[in-house]
Image (tube, rainbow, N blue to C red):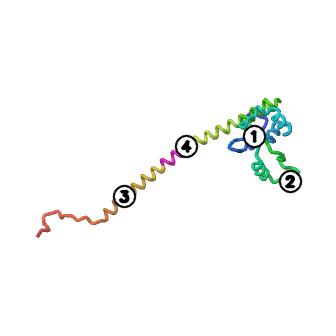
Amino acid sequence: MEENALIPDEIVMNQIYYIRDHKVMLDRDLAKLYQVETKVLKQSVKRNIVRFPEDFMFEMDKEEFQIWRSQFVTSKSDQQGLRYVPFCFTEQGVAMLSSVLNSERAIKVNIQIIRIFTKLRQMLFDNTDLRLEVEKIKSKLDNQDKNMEIVFRYLDELLEKKNEPIPRKRIGYKSDDL
């Protein structure tokens, strides 16, 4: 974690979710990080909606929302801020928020969040390279297993041939012809 980080990276990472094949952050989580009300954040986004195309920000549909709400076991008084369908911001949407919420804290938090998204992408890339290397090793081991199987099959055939009696002609001074 950097010295000038406002929030521990782990907290931000735990607020990144995977929805509709995108890594996103919810409006309520971002509002807490920016220290503004969720309502204020949503109003700012709605006033500048042209800055947030579908690949920057989207609202959960009703089915996603119901699934999301069912994951929290809470009383009706505290529904984790999920009384209203949340906005889901992709990495680009989070970056765009810094132009909409123009406070110094919002800018610093955005920089930190973007760095975390970048770290996550790098970790995924590193894991992909590692996974490819493991697959190469697996395929080599599979080939070695096949080769070993062939060697053992040949050894078994040789052992079977060894146990078969081989008719031999006697060598020596006396012949069997007599």
Q: CA distance from mark 4 to mark 3?
A: 35 Å
Residue marked by disc 2: 75
For the point 86% across and 53% down, the residue is: 75
Q: Tag 2's secondary structure?
A: loop
Q: Which residues are magenta?
A: 133-140
Main secondary structure along the magenta-highlighted residues: helix
Q: Tag 3's secondary structure?
A: helix
Image coordinates for residue 135, horizontal then vertical, percent: 53, 46
For the point 37% across and 60% down, the residue is: 156
The reply to whether callout 2 and callout 4 are in contact (CB within 8 Å) is no
Q: CA distance from mark 1 to mark 3?
A: 65 Å
The question of residue 162 being in magenta is answered with: no
Which amino acid type is marked by label 1?
Answer: Phe
Q: CA distance from mark 4 to mark 1?
A: 33 Å
The question of residue 139 being in magenta is answered with: yes
Residue marked by disc 3: 155
Which amino acid type is marked by label 4?
Answer: Leu
Which amino acid type is marked by label 2?
Answer: Ser
